[in-house]
Image (cartoon, grey):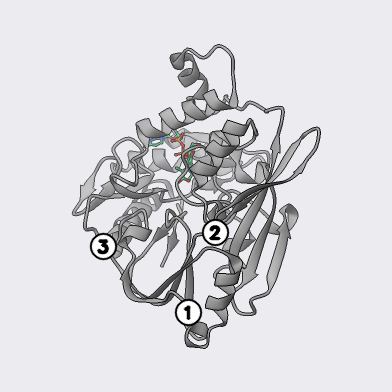
Amino acid sequence: MNLKENISLKQYNTFGIDVLASYFATFSNTAELATLLSDFSTQQLPKLVLGGGSNILFTRNFDGLVLKNEIQGIEVIEEDASGWLVKAGAGINWHSFVTWCIDKGYAGIENLSLIPGNVGASPIQNIGAYGVEQKDSFHQLEAVDILSGEKLLFNKEECDFGYRDSIFKRIFKGKLIITSVTFALKRIPDFNTTYGAIDQELKKMGVTSLSIKSISEAVCNIRRSKLPNPAVIGNAGSFFKNPEVSNSVFNALKISFPGIVGYELASGNFKLAAGWLIEQCGWKGKRVGNTGSHKDQALVLINYGNASGTEIWDLAMSIQASVKDKFDVLIEPEVNIM
Ligand code: EPU
């Protein structure tokens, strides 16, 4: 068992926060994971599973065992007239998986290009971008119960996906390790280009015949133009979720703030653009010590280098308080706080 002690997690979280894990181990398959979970010396330790570390803010050292999921492997497990069921190891980088699918002509996740993180984390917060969510292509996942070591299978219904949400953020939080995710990908794409600037970007690129590859390129261009690359500047994407308010609250806000950005949901409620709310409070591009809100997308908090997790958390709480104060709307973190 390859167990290390007192390891810095700086290179394992995209915020680049320098905290220590008392113990650290990687696993590349379920047998290695089973050994780690059943070993007497580690059984009693609190455990934290890390994938790409792209949705976590560490505010303190982790006094336990960090398990870094490195399970690889992509396998087509079924094929029919409509498409393919593709099983992917949870430790695969998400964008590498998207690229693999695009190269094969497997459609469904092209709008989710360039989202940081690993395959295993994608169902936990039901990653989404440009009008598509991972749940739209999700088929099933395999997981291991940390306490019992039992292997479990979850179908789509059992995951109870919502906006940046699933059962893995609720009753199963911290209890399971996802080992593989199977996606149902299509032969005939449902092109989804109406969200945001995709159509505009495709035009700019001179695309005349739409393909999943061109959509992926358009999404990558848009993301690169306004989201900071975590390899260059520490961040975890959107720090907060876009808050949902009732129709009447939205209409009242619209009277006081005519420029407010909101999208109507099927339920009649409205989803507000948290980036807009934060920008209106004057935070966009503002630097506070080693941290700040990004100049092109206020919803993204960044580590200018050497920020501590608490510094970022304090900034987040100040932003949350000023949005509450100005709009009486609560914006809640999307990232996991440790
Ligand atoms: N806006 C502003 N100021 C800002 C940022 C946004 O006014 O600084 C307004 C603009 O009107 C813009 C609207 O908000 O049109 C929406 O902005 P954007 O298209 O950037 O999307 P978002 O709602 O801020 C969500 C996801 C992103 C995802 C994009 C594109 C959440 C919390 N975030 O952001 O996901 O890439 O849509 O689909 O839902 C992530 O989860 O980490 C993430 C980056």
Task: Give the Cα distance between marks 1 and 2.
Answer: 21 Å
| 197 displayed left or right of 282 | right
- Mark 1 is on which residue type? Pro
Q: Where in the image, quadrant-wise, is ligand 1 located? A: top left
Residue drawn at x 71%, y 34% is 186
Q: In this view, does 71 lie above or below 211?
A: below
Q: Residues within 10 Å of mark 1 (few under 14, many from 20)?
A: few
Which label is found at residue 46?
1
Instruction: Return the disc, 1 or 2, that comes first in the chain's sequence.
Output: 1
**Mark nearer the viewer, 1 or 2:** 2
Q: Is residue 195 visible?
A: yes
Mark 2 or 3, closer to the camera = 2
Q: Name the residue under label 2.
A: 71
**Amino acid type, callout 3:** Ser
Q: Distance between the residues labelled 1 and 3?
A: 22 Å
Q: How far apart are marks 2 and 3 (CA)?
A: 30 Å
Give me the residue at 61% from left, 44% from top: 134
Residue identified by numbered label 3: 308
Residue at 70%, 67% (x, y): give it: 152
- The image shows residue 186, relative to residue 93, as above or below, that is above
Quadrant showing the C terminus: bottom left
Q: Residue 225, image x and y in percent?
A: 36, 30
